[in-house]
Image (spheres, helix red, strand yellow):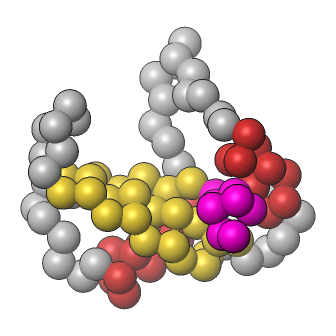
Amino acid sequence: MVNVVQGQHRRIFPDEADGIAYWSFRDWKKWAVHIVAGPAKRPTYKRTAYVRARTAQAAISVARREVYPSPPRSARFDARMVGPRELG
């Protein structure tokens, strides 16, 4: 889930649009959870975890609990649906 300020839009690339279309009718979805820490312009820690969950918030909680149980203190988590090209 991406926090977007009203009036601002996030660009959706073709692979992500295909992923949204593919996963929209399925109960369980694949999510890419991006874990970033440090300043926004120069992050000092970046990881991506691929998890299976029903919602973006559930994917973030799975990534926090299972994949990266001890990320840096200032870590930010962001989940998005995985596209078919990314999965292979």
Q: Which residue lies most toward the bottom here?
A: 66
Please, is residue 16 above or below residue 12 in the view?
Answer: below
- Say which residue appears at 35% left-offset and 82% top-offset: 67
Quadrant where the C terminus sits is bottom right
Magenta stretch holds residue 85: yes
Say if the magenta span includes residue 20: no
Q: Position of residue 77 (x, y in %)?
A: 35, 57
Picture quadrant of residue 9: top right
Residue 76 position, x and y percent, is 28, 53
Q: Quadrant of residue 83?
A: bottom right
Residue 55 in view in this figure: no
Which residue is at a point 60% across and 78% down the rendered structure image? 52
Q: Is residue 2 left or right of residue 77?
A: right
**Chain part drawn in magenta:** 81-88
Residue at (66% x, 69% y) in the render: 87
Residue lying at 79% horizontally and 63% vertically, measured from the top left: 23
Residue 33 percent location from the top left of the image: 45, 63
Position of residue 26 in the picture relative to residue 46 (left or right)? right
Residue 19 is left or right of residue 82, and the answer is right
Classify residue 2 as left or right of residue 46.
Answer: right
The spot of residue 6 in percent (x, y) is: 52, 18
Q: Is residue 71 visible?
A: yes
